[in-house]
Image: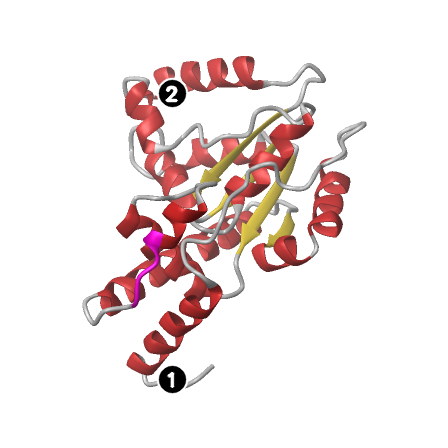
């Protein structure tokens, strides 16, 4: 059985993958089409035969003993591989349809999602268990950050809805998981995930990775309000 986690940056997909990996029964979920990973492998995406060979190696090496393989994929990674003429979108559609289960992870609060990516980009700190380092990464929003934050949010929204449109056009049934729900009710949401995947004996534990916020919630809300004010939207 193969499943695919479809995501965009800062939606909790790493946290979700850690929870699945911790079970030992859900494959080894990673971003196998990440640009840096493809570069390390000699850019197999530059030709269809080499990309197919690379993907076959990935599946063989990362399928759990019960025959389950899972991976996560941002839309920009999907487009990098299948969006050009080298491999082509028809192959991308076939790739999506080759999976038995699909999960779309997203974030309802698009501004907080964009703030999360902005802070991670500025600090180069994407996931950490070091709370002291995370505390140092937080910063107030400057005037120069406002257009950058707007661009990040625009891209993130475009990527989420590109997934939604593609899944709809391909008539693919998928489970939706909102970051906010997973954080608020992890047992219930991970239970929904386990039921959707239908893997025998799967007990999805609480997220295994001790990730922390890059700033405290009060400061994040202050950044959000500053951004809304810059847009003329007032308090939210």
Q: Magenta residues: mostly which secondary structure?
A: loop
Tell me what residue is drawn at x 53 percent, y 13 percent. 61
Residue pointed to by mark 2:
51
Tell me what residue is drawn at x 39 percent, y 73 percent. 222
* Residue 86 shows up from this direction: yes
Find numbered disc 1 in the image and state the secondary structure of the residue it sits on.
loop
In front: 33, or 136?
136
In front: 138, or 16?
138
> Can you tell which mark lies on residue 233?
1
Whether residue 75 sits left or right of residue 107 in the image: it is left
Q: Decide: is 71 above or below 127.
A: above
Find numbered disc 2 in the image and state the secondary structure of the residue it sits on.
helix
Quarter of the image that includes the N terminus: top right
Point out the stretch of residues depicted in magenta: 136-140
Tell me what residue is drawn at x 39 percent, y 54 percent. 135
* Residue 45 shows up from this direction: no
Q: Does the magenta stretch include residue 1?
A: no
Where on the picture, by quarter, is residue 33? top left
Q: Give percent across and percent down for residue 48.
A: 36, 21
Residue furthest out toward the left = 144
In front: 208, or 105?
208
State the CA–CA distance, disc 1 to disc 2.
46 Å
Q: Decide: is 52 above or below 193.
A: above
Q: Give percent across and percent down for residue 123.
A: 29, 48
Q: Decide: is 99 above or below 132.
A: above
Tell me what residue is drawn at x 44 percent, y 27 percent. 32
């Amino acid at each position: 059985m193969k499943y695919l986690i479809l995501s965009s940056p800062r939606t909790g997909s790493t946290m979700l993958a850690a929870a699945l990996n911790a079970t030992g029964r859900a494959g080894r979920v990673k971003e196998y089409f990440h640009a840096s990973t493809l570069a390390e492998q000699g850019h197999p995406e530059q030709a269809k035969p080499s990309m197919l060979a690379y993907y076959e190696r990935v599946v063989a090496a990362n399928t759990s003993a019960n025959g389950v393989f899972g991976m996560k994929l941002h839309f920009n990674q999907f487009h990098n591989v299948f969006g050009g003429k080298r491999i082509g979108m028809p192959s991308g559609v076939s790739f999506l349809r080759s999976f038995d289960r699909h999960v779309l992870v997203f974030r309802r609060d698009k501004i907080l999602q964009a703030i999360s990516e902005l802070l991670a980009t500025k600090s180069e700190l994407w996931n950490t268990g070091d709370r002291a380092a995370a505390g140092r990464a937080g910063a107030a929003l400057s005037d120069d950050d406002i257009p950058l934050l707007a661009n990040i949010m625009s891209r993130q929204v475009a990527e989420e809805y590109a997934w939604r449109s593609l899944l709809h056009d391909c008539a693919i049934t998928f489970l939706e998981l909102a970051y906010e729900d997973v954080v608020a009710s992890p047992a219930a949401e991970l239970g929904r995930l386990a039921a959707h995947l239908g893997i025998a004996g799967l007990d999805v534990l609480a997220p295994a990775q001790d990730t922390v916020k890059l700033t405290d919630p009060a400061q994040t809300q202050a950044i959000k309000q500053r951004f809304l004010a810059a847009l003329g939207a007032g308090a939210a």
